[in-house]
Amino acid sequence: MTQRSVKSIELWDKGKKILPGGSQLLSKRSELFAPNQWPSYYKKARGIEVEDLDGNTYIDMYGMGIGSCILGYADDEVNEAVKKAVDSGSMCLLNAPEEVELAELFCQIHPWAKMVRYTRGGGEAMAVAVRIARAYSGKEKVAFCGYHGWHDWYISSNLADDKNLDGHLIPGLEPRGIPRGLQGTALPFQYNHIEELEKIVAENEIGVIVVETFRFQEPEDNFLGKIRAIADRIGAVLIFDEITAGWRFVLGGVHLKYGVNPDIAVFAKGTSNGFAMAVVIGKEEVMQAAQATFISSSYWTERIGPVAALATIRKMIRENIPQYLERIGTLFVHTVKEAATKYGLEVHAGGLPGLLHFSFEYGEKSQAIRTLFTQEMLRRGILASGGLYTSFAHKEEHIERYQKALDGVFPFLKRAIDSNQVEQMLEGPVAQQGFKRLT
């Protein structure tokens, strides 16, 4: 089966001329997948099936809304709850009672937390968490590990060294527009390198420590526990970023698995299965500092977000989503590894079953090979790249279809690599890596 998304490609070319960067989310740029080939826009999405503007149907074996739709696209239960909320009025002068109901649910799942604040996106939720933590600690310097969004507090790290954030998911982020006065206020350390954090706190007065609990590697040698001990020792507020990891591995976040409680934890993405919602929870004495600073927004009070989150979380609990994701993710990574071995490709697979990644290990040629892989999977009706955000909508039959596609694509890649014809086989440019300005 060969598919081509002509209308979507034409609209992307038009859209990026009037929308700076083309998309509101860097991770959805066509240039990151298969330039001039990727079906950038969708008409419908349900389960893992996506229909583009040309009427082509693909199965999503990569992104699932960049990890936001753990239950699958357009889940019936969540949609039904949202439709009722819309019909009842999504905004009012008065407050939505679901705010209290959702806060109670979060505090039940996280007995260490006593208070809750809401936003509608992960990046802004992290900015709120850091603001609260700074207000409580009275100190401005933040030590951080991982990717935490687009706000000034985080990107300011690149004012000191424009490569500071390169090891934290997205390389090439320039700090233009960030006040120079923020230089030296956000200091990075690498995951599982506790000695780097020790050095930072020895040389700086740190008031906040921010850690992404998990992305592609597990904590080693009590890494999270040692960070907790350091925070206690220096009187810093500890924030765990569970935006990507939360719900995928443990219902309520990775920190529950390791028995290490932060002072604040932040959730978004999969919390509400594709509807805008983010949650900041924390200890009462810390969260009360939100009243000593100004944190307020009209659309943080709309009803749809909390309603969607309640429906999503309850279904995730009922269906034991982490267990399901572990089973389907294990099957997926086994399929990739087996095919790579069968066809003699150098492929590295990592992560945990709920959040997987794999890469072609061919040095400078790797990016072109991944682009060719995406191109050839598109021909077979599959949205694919270097990994998978597993979802409840992924079934064994989808893994089987993926495997059959690999049986055609992997030997094709092998021949292209061996004959040094990878770029010649591409029908567009090599995909970009990291952040680059679109022209």
Image (cartoon, rainbow, N blue to C red):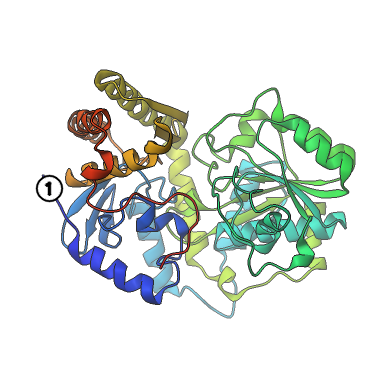
Q: Is residue 179 left or right of residue 433?
A: right
In-front residue for pair 209/76: 209
Q: Residue 282, how many percent across, how many down?
A: 72, 50
Q: Nearer the viewer, residue 437 or 11?
A: 437
Considering only vertical position in the picture, is 6 above or below 201? below
Relative to residue 114, is residue 247 depicted above or below? above
Residue type (three-letter) at the residue carrying disc 1: Thr
Which residue is under mark 1?
2
Q: Position of residue 254 (x, y in %)?
A: 59, 36
In the rendered image, residue 33, in percent from the top left (x then y), is placed at 34, 50
Among the 4 quarters of the image, the one containing residue 145: top right
Q: Please tell me in which quadrant of the rendered image residue 62 appears.
A: top left
Q: Check the image and name the residue furthest to the bottom.
A: 93
Residue 390: tell me if it is visible: no
Residue 417 vs 91, above or below: the answer is above
On screen, residue 428 versus residue 333, left or right, reads left
Tell me the quarter of the image containing the N terminus. top left
**Does the rendering let one see residue 50?**
yes
Q: Position of residue 400 (x, y in %)?
A: 22, 30
